[in-house]
Image: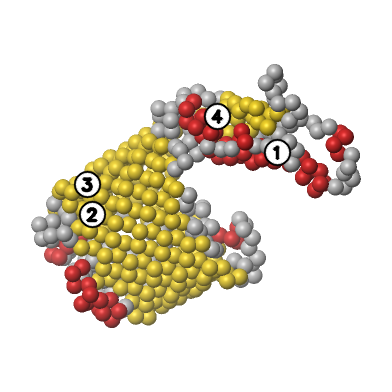
Amino acid sequence: MGQLQAKEMPKQSFDEFDDDSDDALLSHVIEAPARVDRVKVEGVGRTYDDIITDSIKQTEIFKSSTFGQVILQCHEVRNQLERLQCFQGVQIEVDASDGPDATPDHGYEITFRVKELKRYRAGVTTTVGNNEGSLVVWGKLPNLYGRGEMAELSYVYGTKSLLYNLTLRKPFFGPIDSILSGTLLRQTNEMPASSAKLSEQGLVLDYSILFQKVKNSIEWNGLIREILPASRDTPFAIRESAGYTLKSSLKFTSALDQRDDKILPRQGRYCQGSVEFAGLGGDVGFQKYSGLYQVNYPLASFITAQASVDAGILGSFSQDKTFSLCDRFFLGGPLSLRGFSHYGIGPKSDGSSLGGTVYWQSAYHIYTPLPFTKPTKGSFSDNFRLNLFANAGCIQDINASELKDKWRRMGEQLRISYGIGLAIRFAGLARVEINYCIPYSYQRDDSVVPGMQFGFGITFI
């Protein structure tokens, strides 16, 4: 938080207070007249002055008229400096101003002491994805050119994937922050549900804008993709998609997150929508729409009702350009439609999932604290919840033009499951679920998982 130093108040100004009137004394100090005469930032090396000056100008520190406002604006300036991601520490010092231009009696000089990030950083960490753990070896060059730019090289070795990427990121600071990034990547992902492997290499350009709690991004993907059969037993329907494809697509995503926690929220809502158009070059062409909505409602102290719905549709532009196996939707898993194996729902060929072009799923949860515990926010027991859930959903391979005529099939082939389990917030970054699942309604080809099911990841419904 830093040091706070201020001038001693005149003793006669406190005569009206009793010795025990702490609240009145505090109110008097907060409301005491104050004016900021000067702001200094010390410890700056390679960071340019313009982004620091612009960050300070976005606050109202020079408009402060009371000592309480000065303190609040000091913290606001610190937040603005930290958001530049150029410093690893910002300390605050408030002192009486002096000199011929100082405001008599209530002028203050604010000093922000910063420590810049090192020129390079590297490390080895572990991460978790959806039912996958990964080892990450990374290196970063933060604040590369003095205005928050960053270059990052990473190698990710997962249980089902392998990734190399080089990312260059350029932030733009202002009333609305934005980030322009470019990534060169090469990755391989296993698709065990489809008895295939996917290899991708290419370039991804992304421009993201964060306004209040709404994040909008425009992304261009230029990827060379290869689908390979995972074994000799891979069915012919999967082998038909094998080989190389060139994808050039433009994707727009918008997300609003008003939840009080991303892993175990107690209140708030989250909604996300995305639109992707492929066919701007290459031999892949499609239009893809998807959306997710989640609402959390507190029923009582640490008891929450949650409802989510997720849906998507995929269609091709023409017969000349179509989509591949890796562009389709897949459904099922311990963090989506519980009681079914990962991507175990929908059309199949000899037990291998073919994916679908239309899907929807919904989930309903009641979260309660563990028995005989009285959790408080931030306590260890706050990371655990009993989870009563019910899921429903369906996925079909239907052309977009036939959707109105065949919509009834989406209801006739409904999958339903319910159960009880334990939801755990892991390290504040991921979610672990241990559930006892009861598949209630399913189709003959579905891969059901009755009984205990374990899952962990960062996205869930």
Given the image, on which type of amino acid does mark 2 rest?
Phe
- Residue labelled with disc 3: 223
Quadrant assignment, res 79: top right
**Split into 4 quadrants, where in the image is the C terminus?**
bottom left
Given the image, on which type of amino acid does mark 3 rest?
Leu
Q: Dot 2, crowdedness within 10 Å: few (<14), some or many (≥20)?
A: many
- Residue labelled with disc 2: 277
Rendered residue at 61%/28% (across/down)? 39
On the image, the x and y values in percent for residue 347 come to 22, 71
Is residue 321 something one can see in this rendering? yes
User: Element under label 3?
Assistant: strand
Ranked by sequence position, the earlier of labels 3 and 4 is 4
Is residue 436 something one can see in this rendering? no
**Is 118 on the left or on the right of 135, as rendered?**
right
Choose mark 1 or mark 3, whichever is in front: 1
Given the image, on which type of amino acid does mark 1 rest?
Thr
